[in-house]
Amino acid sequence: MRRSVLKLPGGVVHLLQSSGYKVSPLLIRMSSAAASQLRMDNLNPHVIKMEYAVRGPLVIRAVEIEKEIANGAKKPFQTVIKANIGDAHAMGQKPITFIRQVLACVSLPELIEKGNYSSDVKAHAREILDHCGGHSAGAYSQSNGIDIIRKHVADYIRERDGGIPSDPEHIMLSGGASESIRNVLKCFVNDEAPKKTGVMIPIPQYPLYSASIEEFALGQVGYYLDEDNNWSLDISELERAFKEGSSKYDVRVLCVINPGNPTGQVLSKENIEDIVKFAYKHNLFLMADEVYQHNIYAEGSKFHSFKKVLTNMGEPYSKLELASFMSSSKGYMGECGMRGGYVELVNVRDDVFAMYKKMVSAKLCSTILGQTVMDCVVNPPKPGDPSYDQWLKEKTATLKSLKERAVLVKEAFGSIENITCNPVQGAMYAFPRIHLPPKAIAKAKSLKQQPDFFYAMQLLETTGVCIVPGSGFGQKEGTYHFRTTILPQPDVMKDMLDRFKGFHTKFMKEYS
Amino acid sequence: MRRSVLKLPGGVVHLLQSSGYKVSPLLIRMSSAAASQLRMDNLNPHVIKMEYAVRGPLVIRAVEIEKEIANGAKKPFQTVIKANIGDAHAMGQKPITFIRQVLACVSLPELIEKGNYSSDVKAHAREILDHCGGHSAGAYSQSNGIDIIRKHVADYIRERDGGIPSDPEHIMLSGGASESIRNVLKCFVNDEAPKKTGVMIPIPQYPLYSASIEEFALGQVGYYLDEDNNWSLDISELERAFKEGSSKYDVRVLCVINPGNPTGQVLSKENIEDIVKFAYKHNLFLMADEVYQHNIYAEGSKFHSFKKVLTNMGEPYSKLELASFMSSSKGYMGECGMRGGYVELVNVRDDVFAMYKKMVSAKLCSTILGQTVMDCVVNPPKPGDPSYDQWLKEKTATLKSLKERAVLVKEAFGSIENITCNPVQGAMYAFPRIHLPPKAIAKAKSLKQQPDFFYAMQLLETTGVCIVPGSGFGQKEGTYHFRTTILPQPDVMKDMLDRFKGFHTKFMKEYS
């Protein structure tokens, strides 16, 4: 970090002026420019260090290119295709009608009487408003969310997990799952302890984890997923990482993303059981990122919640502390902009839970309309309800189309020379490996860029396709990847794959 | 903090079991209970220490009492009156029709065609959707918010400040103002510096500040507002606090809340100029909490933005770094549950600003519907627009009614023996002082309670009126206050004041 050479405190100029001196405008400008209170040398160092690749330099450049095109710049392509972020609606997915009708009625309650909506839509909106202060979505809710929505979440979880009870008092609604993930991580900050808390996260991982761990000054303990075995999670690797991490940190937390982001694997029940045993053995708090629980595509794959698995294992495992996260941004609804989400806290001590609620209360509450969307997800129309058929049709069509694209993406990338790609069993991403030639690696290094960043930036500049380099998620030393979503609609997807193949062939030739 | 006596690591039981031992259920229970990973002795100590009185024990008890009444409990009152939080809709204020119509159209775009709304409502909704990914409020926006909304915010600020330019690129939309306040504070965390950053905040203050300062391990430097001079801000007190704070911290930030929360004062232009000079002299970053900028009631009072004042002062003051916060939760709209807000960052260095944006990006974006509400606030109907007359009528009526209640509350509390109350010039609160008799103080202390907490809890239990004790906001040693909102509608307000007077008279008699 370079410090600015000249730092004349504003107070000096002030002193001169208030003592009657006439201070030249030049000196004033030098002083005020130099005297910025907030500079790179005194800004929160964790803010400087943290990275969030999903919205990093490539995406900033992609937005610039879009503006250049809008302003008439000539490019070898007409559009930018953003396959960098799991943003379904931005890629053309249509909202679920039921959700949007309920939202409209909650926003403008006269629609419940005047609007031409099904009785279940109206009843749904009315029930939410009956639990809002002053019957308005403009009132704050309790910090943990509207009580009836927490009850619906608990019902959803109980049904999902084959009858295992869920307590609405242990559900906390939040602005997307992200906010809850950050809140839980924050509990483990302990700047009075001799060692930082170590948090185990998969590598590759979703960079919310690495960014938040850096921001909160926690310690990142990465465990590698096994690319050769379809990104599976190997217990011996967990043991290795725990041991290595323990030399530096007090390792207290194990994060698992299932289905995997960016890697798309779906964990088997047996695998989860082994993870639970590992967590128990080392007294780890489990964070289960289960936001893609509706997004399972592969034959034979099934979503098993950590809560169900550990509960069914019986004591002592059933007493393990667990935070399970869910979102309204993924699944078949893809309502990212609504910021709905929740965490269920399982087996957390009452005194600790009271502190957690207190911490969250300073942020008042998450958006009522986001809570409303979450409610529609956990409490959708039931068979026989007037909205049921349309809801089911829309949901099924979306998930079917995602499944087709999951297969298409794997096949397309897998068929390109020097690219290998595991199947996309679930979630919304493929994470193909690019076998870059040494010349390309050398070129990137000469530009002080990560080789996969160099590759991705070239791809963006020449084709308009925006992906995220694997270095933003973490990967084994000497391997290079990228994350692409499976979200472009079929025609755009075809266009994207064509652009990609053309670029890749040229790139490989140039650097071979 | 007591540590649990028995802490048998889960690993021991695991080892015994996997070695073939049959472990008794009792030992398992003891082990798993004792082995909670997250306990009061290893939970983030800042989470334990932080307090947020606006949602503290009194409010938790108020919610309990409401449930008791609903379950048929006999109480000397029928309803709980929540005067603890600035939650206008919960207290019966009606939403602004224009805002809700736009929200409904953005949520369910078919209403733009099919709904019977004014052309300006439709145009407003259409413009927002045209700037959403995939024309859907379900898509993420850029992390700083939708560009057209940031432009409207900048236009609003420019107009408010008599033509002083505002750059949309320096506006960051957020989930209420709270999120932005916390983001800016976070920039000043510096755990690598020899001294913690000191943040100057008014006493009494809005406890979001004290809670966040504690959570982020910053240093709180309180300056007292002058109750005898209508809660005015005296520069010599700022100097005293700065000097005292500097012995312990590196004081870098000055927070000012104008209009004041909980104190309701409105700063004069001259006072703001003096504050700006003070900030310049000591090279402080200014945080101006201006969320109540629409809520000015007193004759002769006027809202002056910090940005306008410091810009008009010319160099060097016009170069001072400033963060100004605004919300859609207050004003005449009171849309707390929508979580709309923004910060304008003025004179912040480009490199620092880039880091700020990077930090925010890991949280993806604030809710699109909250951004929509903020848009309606900064870009309301104009004279001649079909919605203008109704919008103006609703806005004027709400502000007029708030003004009447501001006067009513001051007069009512001011007329009670042993209570003194400054005028409510602005914002939404009165902060009366209670002159408690020594016996009441002694009784409170015997219960290990703050005297004003004891008073407020007695009030709640016997009358159902929920206010927040002054100790939650900070107050001069030996003085006792409470914060009440001016939000109860006139009939509820009358009821509340009656209950209050009855309680107060009895309380004073009991402890005199």
Image (spheres, coloured by chain):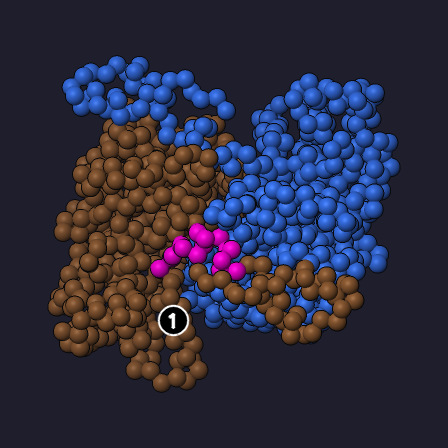
Chain colours: A blue, B brown
Q: Residue at x 77, y 63 (%)?
A: B18
Q: Position of residue B200 (x, y in %)?
A: 30, 42
Callout 1 crowding tier (Cα within 10 Å): few <14, some 14–19, many ≥20: some
Q: Using the rendered image of the protein, determine whether residue B119 is visible from the camera's viewpoint.
A: no
Q: Chain of mark 1?
A: B
User: Can you say which quadrant of the picture contains the N terminus of chain B?
Assistant: bottom left
Residue B87 among those drawn in magenta:
no
Q: What quarter of the picture does the C terminus of chain B occupy?
A: bottom left
Which residue is label 1 attached to?
Answer: B61
Left or right placement of residue A37 versus residue B409 in this view: right
Tell me what residue is drawn at x 69 percent, y 65 percent.
Answer: B13
Q: Is residue A10 above or below residue A368?
A: above
- At horizontal 28% and vertical 73% (from top left) the residue drawn is B458
Quadrant of the rendered structure where residue A210 is?
A: top right
Foreground pick, A121 / B303: B303
- Residue A6 is left or right of residue A2, and the answer is left
Which quadrant would residue B280 be assigned to in this image? top left
Q: Residue at x 60, y 52 (%)?
A: A252
Specify start and end residues of the magenta stretch as a single range: B39-53
Q: Amino acid at mark 1?
A: Arg
Q: Report the magenta stretch's main SS.
A: loop
Tell me where residue B425 appears, x and y as whole percent: 21, 52
